[in-house]
Structure formats: C-alpha cells, structure tokens
Amino acid sequence: MSTWRRLVRIHPLLGLIVSPILAHVPTASAQLGTAEIAERSLPATATVLTLDDRGDTLSQGSGFLVHADGIVATNWHVLRGATAIRVTVGRDPTPRRATILVRDSTTDLALLAIAATGVTALALDSSATLVGEKVIVIGNPLGLSGTVSEGIVSAARTEAGLELLQISAPLYPGASGGPVLNAYGRVVGVATSFVDGAEQLSFATPVRYVGRLLADAGRDSPSTIADVPRDAPEIEGDSLALVRQAAEGGDAQAQYALGVRYAAGAGVPQDFEEASAWYHAAALQGVARAQFHLGVMYAFGIGVDRDDEEAYRWVRRAAEQGDAEAQYNVGMFFATGTGVPESDRRALVWYQRAADQHFPPAEFSLGVMHRVGRGVMQSESQAAIWFAESAEHGHADAQQTLASMYAFGQGVPRDYVEAYKWFSLAAVSHGPHAEDQASAAAHMRDLLAARMDPDDLAEAKRLAEEWKPDPGRRQ
C-alpha cells in the first residue's frame, strides 16, 4: 500500500511528520507568575471542535501547539466519532481544518496537524513533577475559551499501568486536552478528566506521553514514506552500481529507482535529500511516479522545503499522465483548498478520473461527496452506489459505511444479511493500524447477529467467507 493513500482523507498534506523534536529547555530558570505564564502561553493554546457528517457540532475540547509545523496535542476522547475537525489557535477566531496525525487510546492522547508553519509552540518538560508543585491549566471549559486556572499537583498516581497527575486546578467539560503548565511556563501534563461534582479532583496525563507520541510519529513516518513502491523499476540485475551508473548517465527510470532506494534506505543510507534530488531529475523527464513522490516530499517538507503549491504542481503533472493515485490526490487538493483555491466541482472531476480506473479511495470519496451534498445534489442512493464500488474493491471504510447503510436502510433497502457481511469484511480489512475501526465493525456485526434469523445469519457468514475483492482493484 502506498504512502499517500495512508493519509487522512480530509487533508492530503497533513498525515505524517518526520523527526519531530520534543522541546528541551533549561531547568534552572526563574519561576514566573500566573499572569506572565498565561500571557506567554495563550497564543499557543487551541480550541478543538469536532463535527459530524452533517456539519453539526459533536463536541468541543482544548489543545495546544507542540511543534512549529502546526502540530496540536489534545485528548483522543475529544475526537472520537468526528467526521471533521476544526481548530482555532490563540486569539485567532479562524477555524482551521485539522487531521489526526497519530493517537493512542491507552494514554487518551492524540496529535492533530493543521496548516501552519513557523508557529510558536509551548515548551514541554518531561522531567519529574513533584507533589505540591504549582500548576496552571489553560483550556475552554463550557465553551469559555482561554480560561486560566491555578492549583497544585495533589498526588502522582498509577491507574492500569498509566501514570497520572492528580491536580487541584478545577476542570470542567471542554477543558480536556488543554496544557497543564508548571511555574516555569512549560507543559508538564495534558488535562484529561475530573470527578463529576468534585471538579478540583482532576487528572492530567504526564507530558512525556506526548513526547513518546511525537517520537512515534517520527519513527513511523520514514518507514511509511520509505515503502518501496511495487512499481519501482528494475534496472538490469537491480545492482545498485548499475542503477547509479544508469542514473548518472541520464536514464530516467534509473533516476527514479535510485530515488526510491534513498527514500527507503534500501542498499544505501536513508537520505531524503538525495531521494528528492533523484526524483526531481526523473520527474523533469516525465516519469509520473517520480513526479508523484516528489509532490509528496514537497507536501511534507521531506528532503525539500515544504511547499503546498509545488506539491500540487508535481502531483498534478503525474495525474495528467493518468496516474490514478495522483488523480485522487489532486481531488483532495481541490477539496481542501490546499495549494489551490478550494473547489468541490474540480475535486469531483479528479475523483471521477481516479474512480474510472477503479481506485478505491476515489470511489469512497465520491460516495462521501454525494452523501453530504458537496459539489453535487445530496443523494444517499448515489452515495451507496459509490460506497459499494469501493467496498467491492476492498476499501475498509467503504465496507463499514455500506454496512451501516444496509443496517439502517439508508440509500438502500434494509438488509441485515448484507450489513453483517460488510461489517465482517470491514473488521478484517481495517487491519492492525485501525484497531478502533475494526473493533467497532466487529461490535456492530455481533449486535446484528443477535437480531438475525439463524438461516439469514448462516447465509451472511457464507457470503463473508466467500467474498473476494474485485480483480479491478487498484492499490
């Protein structure tokens, strides 16, 4: 599976980050007053708003910037069930589209990515926090943004193997995900929960867990983007020496192959600058896959300076050559207004081109557009047609969505047999990197089983066991 398709659909450019760094700050500095800490920290705090598929508000929480490239930390429970996420930062009321970069249900933490670079992030202090230390919490309790409260670390506790800070600063609904700062203005924890009716009995997750999440994102990103594409060209004997010789002689396919090897660290030290240089050389000679991968590198600033417009330009060139994955991603550029003016109509055109090549994510995106009425007349039945196409090609999200539509009779006749079949397939298709989605699909399948006639259940199980993805499937 290619790198680009693993990214969150809502935003094509905010799905991974390479080598994020947990801020290290001196420990021997002067303590600050609460007012000064608030003044310094408020511009880097955030309001996190989640929306359902109708655009209605699901929940509101808090967050804070942890990286200058627009990475926001918050609680995972704030984001659960969201179809879309919007983030406002500091005193800027402009909502920004956000995508989930990485999350951990065990620590109840998540990192969001927003379109921002060079922003001021809060310093993180993962050293031990002492009981009795002063702490300041900034968040949006009950929708009151930028609320500052003060307390102390009341205790350090361990629950189910997870360390927690018990704090006396009061928390209320909406404060979850906000920063808990020490007297030096550094984040020591993430506001997580409180005891209902005893809001000064509150809990925060130590910030070192955020540091681990950042490190995990950094370790995962290179290995994800470095997957050697299945269509990587083979040069005679696939010898590195022969590949390099041919690349230096101007062979475009060899240049692309060498870029792949540097990106993957296959036979050479991993070097993204070298990879981008060789991709560029091949892209200039018209190699579509090189153009696509170069666009990805510009999208994330990997080996090159991040540049959304350059990312779009190179991905568009690959798309114009008929590359289905690139066509789908050009659609995402237009759908999100990244590097180009936002246009649902143009997004639909490019999704359709990729869908014509049976590219499952594009088929799924067309289903979403029809279901919510973006760029087209809203139609559950037309959405179901596209979800069915994508599901038959093995797309897990499409399988789960189609299953729900059959279960509730949305756009299709209610059919528990079909619903059970698709929930069963989704539970498997989501794979190990989407445990929550797979678990949800399995749970819905089991709920249906309890309501089904034994003969229907047997038929549904048979259909699930015998199902094979359509051979037209494109990965």
Image (cartoon, helix red, strand yellow):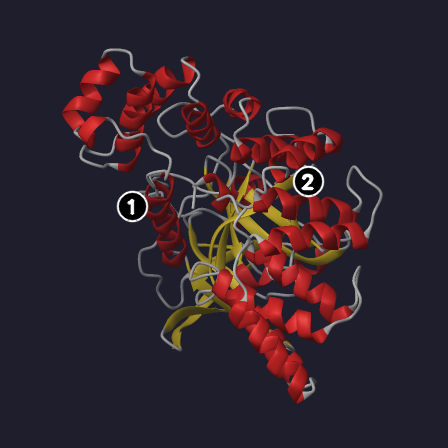
* View extreme (top): residue: 249
- Location of residue 167 with respect to 86 vertically, above or below: below
In the image, 17 versus 246, the foreground residue is 246
* In the image: residue 115, left or right of residue 378: left
Work out whether residue 254 can be spotted.
yes
Q: Picture coordinates of residue 309 (x, y %)?
A: 55, 21
| Residue labelled with disc 2 | 95
In percent of the image, x 79 and y 63: which residue is there? 410
In the image, 163 versus 151, the foreground residue is 163
In percent of the image, x 59 and y 30: which residue is there? 330
Query: Local crowd at mark 1 within 10 Å, few (<14), some, or many (≥20)?
Result: few
* In the image: residue 115, left or right of residue 54: left
Residue 365 picture quarter: top right
In this view, the mark in front (2 or 1): 2
* View extreme (bottom): residue: 454
Q: Are marks 2 and 1 in contact (CB under 8 Å)?
A: no
Kind of residue at badge 2: Pro
Kind of residue at badge 1: Ala
Residue 396 picture quarter: bottom right
In the image, 228 versus 203, the foreground residue is 228
Pointer 2 or 1: first along the chain: 1
Q: Picture coordinates of residue 13 (x, y %)?
A: 52, 35
> Which disc, if any, is residue 112?
none
Q: CA distance from mark 2 to mark 1?
A: 37 Å
Secondary structure at badge 1 equals loop
Secondary structure at badge 2 equals loop
Query: Local crowd at mark 2 within 10 Å, few (<14), some, or many (≥20)?
Result: some
> Which disc, if any, is residue 28?
1
Q: Picture coordinates of residue 347 (x, y %)?
A: 68, 33
Q: Picture coordinates of residue 337 (x, y %)?
A: 66, 30
In percent of the image, x 78 and y 53: which residue is there? 54
